[in-house]
Amino acid sequence: MTKLVVKDDCFDFQETIETPATEIIEEIVYMDENLIKNKDLIRVDINIVQFPIFSKNTQKKVNQIVKYYFNKNRDTYITVTPAAGDYIPGEAEEKIFIALMQLMKEKGMPKKFIISSNELKDKLKLNTNRYAEIVKKSLIRLSRTNYNFKNTMYSSEYKGTIKEEISTPILTLKILTLSLKENKKYRLSYKDKRIKELYEIDISDHFYNNVIQKGYLVYNSSILLEISTSTARTIYMLIEKLRFNNLYLKIDTMFLIKRIPLKYDKKLLSRTIKVLEHAFDELKKKELIQDFKFLKDKTWEKSEIEIFLKESSAEEKQQRFFEDRNDFRKLLTVSTISETEHDMIEMMEVIQKENVEKALPKTIEKSVTITDELIDKILGLMPSKARTLKTMPKTIKDAIIQYGYSKVEAVAIYMKKNKVDKVRAYFIKALENNWTEDETIELEKPASNIKKVSEIDSSKEEIKNYVKELEYFNSLSTEEKEKLEEKVYKAYIEECGQETKIQKLAFNAAKNRLIAEYILKNNLVKNEVSKEREIDLSVIDDINYYTDYISKNVELYRNILNLSEERIKEIKIETLVELGTKIIAKTIILEEINASIAKKLK
């Protein structure tokens, strides 16, 4: 870690800031608190998780600027600059920020919101009469500290790291004095006469955009705030990011020391190791990890740390992600935006996403710094065979430019986990088909003789050609239908050559056609149907058809998975919320509905 200390005499200027009259617009959003499943879940911007935004140094100095370098060329760094006469943010500000994220969620995820020191006191469980002073000082410090990101800030908008230098605070602050006439209206919301001031918080654009879009990780705020030291808290947050969905993680000790960061002095390195041990011990006692082990190879500089997590950790992480996402959707649903406006906004977001993806290669190429270290890191995540292919470095570079680093990293991790053989071919195919769009979807290893979902044509015309066969099937008893469907499924899997989740989704998407073909092929229709009738295919375009389809498909799993009535309703609602726009626009396909339901049943 490199520190740049700037003394008072280095500054010889005065800055005057003129501000126009401020207009305050009140937006009160009423919502049923029962809609939020877990109020403790918060979204934390990815930059705050992986970079030293909050200092661990307990001996900070006034006017001390800290500059963190992340490569040998010294062109990838973060500079933290405090306000004149102040310190950079530390552990107190970190806890304040976590509490702010929780309050932001409770208020409906607005970019700008108003709070009192009492609200932060309750979240932080401060047992001191000086809480108002502590809160105010920390909020001012957060708002006046400037962060300079050079080749480091991750942007969900660009799906990668921004190359240009970005200068921004975490938030801006406005102090509202309630004794002033123009602020008396806030007394309606805050009746406690002891409250003298309110704080209007405005989360900076870069951080807020990441929290709203896919530039965040989900944590339980209560767990974070209960961790006693900032070092242990940072280690826990890094573990949750780096491990993906694995239950085992191995980290270089020096990487962890520098990334936290902790003081590095070769002569006193054993002291720093003890700080790490103490932090890991706390995480183990709180059952946030199962165990840890230092692997020392002659010197501590070459040592590694093994981290083991309990079996339930992967499921808990996914559960946090889904609960938060569902809460966020519900918050959107109950906001002051009308249903029609909400549908239009979602449709515009889809269009905007498609336009961004079309322009992605040019946009990303300008915004991402692709170094040899970055490519080497991706190669290290892939199966070892990837390093033997001379074309892989260029393939990885082109992929990052086109799809973004996060997507490339996710595919690489999955490939190694599942021991993919045809590395380059699979890598390209996975990116092209967007198999890693959602971190919870498990990818399947393709085989040359496996049918893809897209290859199964369940068009209206084909269904129309099997009227007799479908009528025969519908005339069977429930038990007979189940037996026949089981036979068709076995025959289908034998033809495919492999049984995977993709094949199950494909079968469900084209089940009627496959059953009809089986009936025709095996000549099961013994008696002619007395009166032929055509299937009314116009129902496919009817919204009621899809809602009924969702309902019936979810009900199938009631007894199999022992689902409660409440969970059944939740899955139906969640599926409709997720796919509602496409259903309204009549662009939905049954494969998407089946896939959506399957995810929610995990």
Image (cartoon, grey):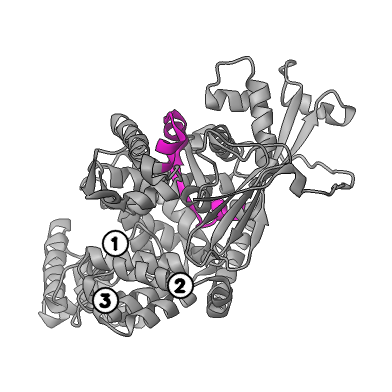
Q: Which residue is mark 3?
A: 386
For image coordinates 70% across by 36% down, the residue present is 140
* Residue 572 is covered by the magenta coloring: no
Write down the quadrant of residue 54 in the picture: top right
Contact between marks 2 and 3 (CB within 8 A): the answer is no
Q: Is residue 459 visible?
A: no
* Outermost residue, bottom side: 391
N-terminal-most mark, 3 or 1: 3
Q: Determine which of the numbered discs, if any, sits on residue 442 in the image.
A: 1
Asked whether the viewer can see residue 276, the reply is: yes
Q: Which residues are magenta?
A: 208-234
User: For the residues carrying marks 2 and 1, which lies nearer the camera in this image?
Assistant: 2
Q: Taking 392 as reference, is 176 above or below it?
A: above
Secondary structure beneath label 1: loop
* Residue 493 x/y as whole percent: 14, 72
In the figure, 464 relative to 13: above or below?
below
